[in-house]
Image (cartoon, helix red, strand yellow):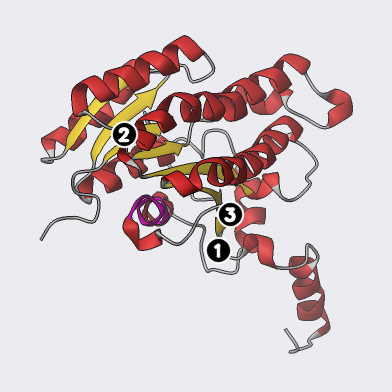
Amino acid sequence: MAGKLEGRVAIITGAGGGLGAECARVLASHGASVAVADINGTAAEVVAESIRAGGGKAIGVSTDVSKEADVKAMVEAVVAHFGRIDVLHNNAAILNMEQRQKDRDVVNMDVDAWDRSMAVNLRGAMLCCKHAIPEMLKLGRGSVIFATSGLGAQGDVTLSAYAASKAGLMMLAKSVAAQYGKQGVRSNALQIGLAPAENAHETMPAALLNIIRENHLTPELGTPRQIADVVAFLASDESSFITGTTIVADGGFGSHTPSMVGMKALFAQSGSNKM
């Protein structure tokens, strides 16, 4: 039985590790030919090789999505190798330890960190759309997916640049849907809850992870596979009537009042069984 993405070609940016790598593996498992794009070309090739070793089809492409020449070359390489582009998952983002330390509240913002966040997270996604969507238009079909975050919808005490860039992606998803929907190209944002991959724990203190876990409405944080499954859904015809919107996969994190966890603790102290 053919996979639901059999015959499709997908580009996944920022796929040299973490959630992007898992998305690449899962889309390949559904039959897609995958272009693993990452600024770290070696990491991208390692992921691509693991997919090929498992019987899938993949290539690694070294790409800095903030540079238009890199993005144009990446799209050309994918078309040259696979002949088409059906899916673009704009997953690339910058949020390493150095960036976290500089991307703070607005008064204490490092402006270079702000610019870097916008260049990679928002400009990068726009550039990938600019060069990949024309290939989709040739086919009369395509799915564009933007990896966003609850920080793009909810204010927080830090990561102001990251949050603003992710909010921008939600609007960009709507713009792409409005502009190319009648030509067969769908576009959606995926608001992701915390689903720690192997690289997340290096940049997030355990205490912070615990706070976020307590605010989820699921017993545990998400897993990369749970996010990748939603990406595969949006990439496939199963979601053919979904476009121009934001799908939330966050374990209920964004669905409740910010005071809920504190209220639960208060009721527990008072011996109330109301919650």
Q: Residue at x 21, y 28 (%)?
A: 83
**Front one among 210 and 113:** 113
**Mark 2 residue element:** loop
Q: Which residue is mark 2?
A: 85
Position in image of residue 175 (x %, y %): 61, 41
- Number of the front mark, 2 or 1: 2
253 up-or-down from 44: above or below? below
Q: State which quarter of the image contains the C terminus.
A: bottom right
| Labels 3 and 1: the sequence-earlier one | 3
Query: Which residue is tagged 1?
Result: 251
Classed neighbour count for the residue bearing mark 2: other residues with Cα under 10 Å, few (<14), some (14–19), many (≥20): many
Q: Residue furthest bottom?
A: 273
User: Which circle, 3 or 2, is nearer the viewer?
Assistant: 2
Q: CA distance from mark 3 to mark 2?
A: 22 Å
Q: Amino acid at mark 3?
A: Thr
What residue range appears in magenta? 230-236
Residue type, numbered disc 2: Ile
Whole-Å distance between the Cαs marked 2 and 1? 31 Å
Number of other residues with Cα within 10 Å of mark 1, as a class: few under 14, some 14 to 19, many 20 or more = many
Task: Give the camera-side residue of 93 and 210.
Answer: 93
